[in-house]
Amino acid sequence: MHIFARLLLACSLLTTLPVAAQQCPGTVPAQGAPAPTGLFPADNWWNTDIRSAPVDGNSASYIAYINNGGTRRLHPDFGGEAETGSQEVYGFPSVIVDGNQPKQAVTFDYWDESDGVDYDTGEGVPFYPVPAQAISQAHWIEGGAPGTVDQRDDNDRHILMVDCTNRHLYELYNVWYSTAEQRWYAGSGAFFDLDTNERRPDTWTSADAAGLAIFPGLVRYDEAANPAVTEITHAFRVTVRATNGYVYPASHRAGSTSGALPMGARLRLKSSVNGSDPALRTTDPVARKIFRAMQKYGLIVADNGTDMYISGTFDVRWDNGILNPAFSTLSASDFEVVQLGWKPAAVTLNAVSASPNPVVGGQTATGTVTLGSAAPAGGAQVTLADASPAFSVPASVTVAAGATSATFPITTVASTTSASGTLSATYAGVTRTTTLTVSAMPPSLYIDNASITEGNSGTRVMNFTVRLSRPATTAVSYTIATANGSAVAGTDYVARSLAGETIPAGQTTRSFAVTVNGDTQAEPNETLLVNLSAPSGAYIADGQAVGTVFNDDGPTLSVADLTVVEGNNGQYQVNFLVSLSQPAPGPVSYDISTSNGSAIGGNDFLVRNLTGETIPAGQTSRAFSITVGGDTAVETNEVFYVNLTAATGATIYDGRAVATLVNDDGPRLSIADISFAEGNSGSRQVTFTVQLAQAATVPVTYSIATASSSAVIGSDFVGRSLTGETIPAGQTSRTFTVTVNGDTAVEANEAFVVNLTQATGASILDGTAYGVLLNDDGPRLSIADVSATEGASGSKQVVFTVSLAQAATVPVTYTIATANGTAGLGSDYVARMLTGETIPAGQTSRNFAVVINGDTVSEANETFVVRLSQASGASVFDSQAVGTIVNDD
């Protein structure tokens, strides 16, 4: 059996379109239900904006023919029932079916121009989804009478069926159902795929004389009267009394009357007639919306009938008492005929480009697609593709209607090598390409913070270290300069600025010395800034360092951090300790107050503010109590702050305490730090463990992602981010792997961060883990912790050992300095800093002595730290030692 190819295509589409595309009403078949959105593509002839289309040279003659010596006014050829409750209706009934509707065979008068036919026999095959209700019920077929009523000689008797599952349109002309034969008859029938722009073959009819679909050209109540639909975006079907041939988009003629318009001709409502907008002749918003569509999309001549009759759907909600007079305000003379056969110029893709090109790996480039002319209504969706692992692009980008270009992001991968690949864009069968080069990411440039004790007189040198994430193959230059923080140039330090500073090829560090002035003024710790700029051969990852000048004059005032378990209910007090570094000769007063962090005053703790709090002369501390409240909410740990201000008699050394309320409700999520040897080449995976303190009764989900710290994404490790990670109910852990890269650079240990966020089913107890890449290249420098009993008086030395894991072949130099922990500078220990300390070649250690002071104060063990920096000839493996002063009072 030979079946017309259009039938085969329809059957194929019926079985392949996804169910997800459905826009079906709750009950089918349905008469008059809203149609699926997007009838035909945006560039279909029914949906084309014709405002810029030229006027036909014979427009005035065609309009005169329609007026026929008078004034032909518009009329809405649609409405409700002829009389309330009557069988007869105005307009086209529409039927919505789904993909399960049984198909019926139809016998056609014009079978050779119809779909759903065996062309060898001329007989119809099961193809049209005609509902059984249309046989015996009113209002399913044009005219209103059931299918068993034969009105083929008196009425066009169309039935229009939309398959909402597969987005197919079926239309029949002049139908009748033979009860005796249990069979449908029709003049002609047509099938349309609503997602394509296929025209009927030339000279073929459809269910309409012009060979066009009917349903997409109807004025529909669900569009016109719906306030949520601000614009009708298609043309309307119009009839005239006679026609002459056909032009695009029509495919069939139905007359050859000289002077008449051809089938497929377009009429456009003028935007101005005698200086006024004709669409505003009515105040009815429904009619105005319809008239606006006539100005933008126009009317298409589709059948012979009464001049200027506009087709629409049957719907009992239409109010012809309003529509008829509104339509009659317009006449044929308010319209002009668009150039016969006009179609918008085909929109083509001219080019795709990327900027910058080349682009440094790890940075985002911007892609641009350019069309040869403005995009059609609905926009132009351009498909994108990349052919390189060095970059990626979205699947597509849409050029907005009326625009000629659109941009899209290009994500590149950070790498130590360059790579090139093809970026392609495709639209309307045309593909354009460009080559994008992703350059090797240069090394990152950092500057480390520094600190120094001020001293009482003279000057001291504070050294800052500028470093690269890896050695560069060429020299890296930059500008470096000081800037004021709370410290002032000329008074507290000597300003310095250098341009063209250079880290030679193959090296990773360079020092910058700033001279600090000593004084005996009791004042807060002060800071200055050192800024990097104008890099060449590297990019600045951290371009500002803070230099802290520790005050060593007179007593200093601090408030200590506090961590408490929240509890489940009730209120209780927690005490913050405000302390002096040494007793003051007179009273020390200050203001103290709470402030919100993630914990909120009045909810998680009680707000408290005190002024003029006093530590009497000779004493060293005073408590400040805050009331906190417990709850049973599963939440993250929360913090609030206690702040010191307005101190007299002492300087504020640490003026903010962090109070951490540890959540103890429900399961708590944490991730542990790990450390591992870096390796000399290749890559390896390291594993972090995300852990619950107790198994949850429901799945626990969270997001997890890496972030750079001193280790850099792309060069030191491969960035990774996951959402919706899950620890199933009853289980307590899940792993997360990160790929790290080895190298042979002699460098400090480096670290990256893994963060937990967006947890559900548990609170986050510790949401940050550090992955420490232990440098294993060349000699490694470290310093060991030391502890010593305090003693009741006098002073003693504690000795720290700086050691190399293996002897170096050249001298190893470094800077070593003390810094405060809980021990007070001057009262508990004597600050010390040495630069250019050296472990000679062939040796493995050197000592560093710090003086600690005894006392008889009963107090907690106290700590200070000793830090290594600015190492040359070895990498720093462990840069910080803790000195513990063990209380013996």
Image (cartoon, helix red, strand yellow):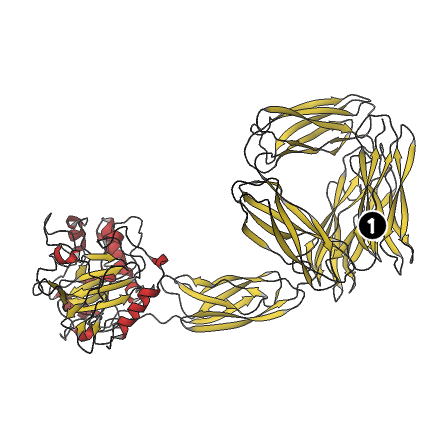
Three-letter amino acid code of the residue under disc 1 = Ser
Quadrant of the rendered structure where residue 887 is? top right
Total of numbered circles in the picture?
1
Q: Is residue 277 visible?
A: no
Can you give x and y, in whole percent of width and height, for residue 428 in the image? 40, 71
| Residue under the point 54% across and 51% down | 723
The quadrant of the image that shows the N terminus is bottom left
The quadrant of the image that shows the C terminus is top right
Circle 1: is it few (<14), some (14-19), or many (20+) Cα within 10 Å? some
- Observer-nearest of 413 and 704: 704
Can you give x and y, in whole percent of width and height, for residue 609 in the image? 64, 25
In the figure, 259 relative to 699: above or below?
A: below
In the figure, 873 relative to 252: above or below?
A: above
| Residue under the point 62% across and 57% down | 719
Circle 1 sits on which residue? 782
Q: Is residue 388 visible?
A: yes
Q: Secondary structure at mark 1?
A: strand
Residue closest to the far top: 616
Can you give x and y, in whole percent of width and height, for residue 212 in the image? 23, 68
| Residue under the point 11% across and 48% down | 85
Q: Is residue 619 left or right of residue 704?
A: right
In the figure, 637 relative to 502: above or below?
A: above
Q: Is residue 429 left or right of residue 179?
A: right
In the figure, 676 relative to 584: above or below?
A: below
Quadrant of the rendered structure where residue 681 is? bottom right
Can you give x and y, in whole percent of width and height, for residue 187 in the image? 14, 69
